Amino acid sequence: MTATRDPYGTALESVLRTVPYNSGTEYLHWYHKSAPDPRHGLACIYQTLYVAERATALGAPEANILQDLRHIAAVFETGGDVVVLDPYLLHLTPIRFPAQEVAAGHSSVEVDAAPVRLDARGGRRPGRLAAVYRSSDHGYRIRLSYSKYSVEKDTYVLSRHFTLRSENEFVYADFSSDMLGLLTHPEQNSVSIRALVAGAEVTAEAIIPLKGFADREFSAADIWLRSGQGVACRNGDGVPASAVWADLERSTDLGRADIEEHLVSAAQVYQKIADHRTDLPGYSLQDA
């Protein structure tokens, strides 16, 4: 299918492959007044705004950007169908609710998502994004439930859940009016970069947990790496760490030292702006 016939799939693929998720970029943007290399990626809201812009440039209608607290997704109404794009949730194909089901007031869709993992028997286990559309007194609501396969538990585990309501339209000026509050929200307990590996449907991540930030001197030794199979290791832990770094470098076209410096700088900004009288919940390196 060509880009003009499928602007949603083309835009989604483009963002997944070229715009990693990065929770640290905004610290440097707002507090260092710098413009980090775009290859480092974007925070989740900017991934969504970019995918909506890309889809519209390819022929889709303007998106409704709907907000659930600190998260947003792009919702398109086209020929009676409702299409959802949310790159943060790593779905590999667009979510599309058919017009007939939308008109009836209820639709349920499930699509594959990254990472695609292998079970103990070598079977392919993609992530799942389950989506439910329901009409409501105020318009409609869409529930998004993202699950990943846990190799250790041999089952799927819910990782993220959001509810989009048609009346909750995203207004950037309102959202960004308290950036200090957003960037030091208790849920923000790490800085990280997560890329979809080039030529594959697995992820590679580099993470600095922020718990205990007030008493730490951040360095590259604080970085943890997580493979597409969900296995975490410390930076410098031989072959496992080297394999994740190779995936990150290939997927972002950035060097290891560049990524390390970026994450450490973001953690140092957090350390400066956050309230040192409080601490954060621990970051779970066990992935699903």
Image (cartoon, rainbow, N blue to C red):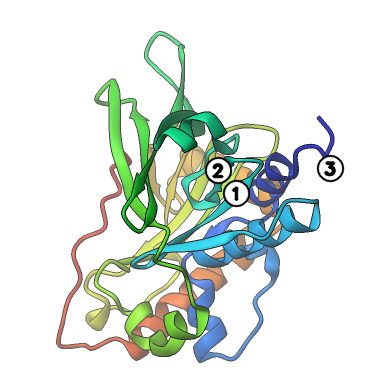
Q: Taking 282 as reference, is 124 left or right?
A: right
Is residue 163 visible to us here? yes
- Is there a contact, CB below 8 Å, between mark 2 and mark 1? yes
Q: Which x, y percent locates residue 70?
A: 37, 67
Q: Nearer the viewer, residue 227 or 116?
A: 116
Q: What amino acid is found at the position of numbered circle 3 in the picture?
A: Thr
Q: Nearer the viewer, residue 94 or 212?
A: 94
For residue 15, the mark is none
Mark pair 2, 1: CA separation: 5 Å
Q: What amino acid is found at the position of numbered circle 2 in the picture?
A: Val
Q: What amino acid is found at the position of numbered circle 1 in the picture?
A: Glu
Quarter of the figure that contains the C terminus:
top left
Report the mark closest to the observer, 2 or 3.
Answer: 2
Q: Secondary structure at mark 2?
A: strand
Q: Of callouts 3 and 1, which one flags the residue occurring earlier in the amino acid sequence?
A: 3
- Is there a contact, CB below 8 Å, between mark 3 and mark 1? no
Q: Nearer the viewer, residue 107 or 104?
A: 104
Q: Residue at x 52, y 44 (%)?
A: 204
Asked which quadrant contains residue 99, the reply is top right
Q: Secondary structure at mark 3?
A: loop
Q: Which x, y percent locates residue 48?
A: 57, 59
For residue 77, the mark is 1
Q: How many marks?
A: 3
Q: Residue at x 28, y 33 (%)?
A: 157
Q: Taking 280 as reference, is 266 left or right?
A: right
For residue 82, the mark is 2
Q: Residue at x 28, y 38 (%)?
A: 158
Mark pair 3, 1: CA separation: 17 Å
Q: Which x, y percent locates residue 10?
A: 74, 42
Q: Residue at x 41, y 82 (%)?
A: 268
Q: Which residue is mark 3?
A: 4
Quarter of the figure that contains the N terminus:
top right
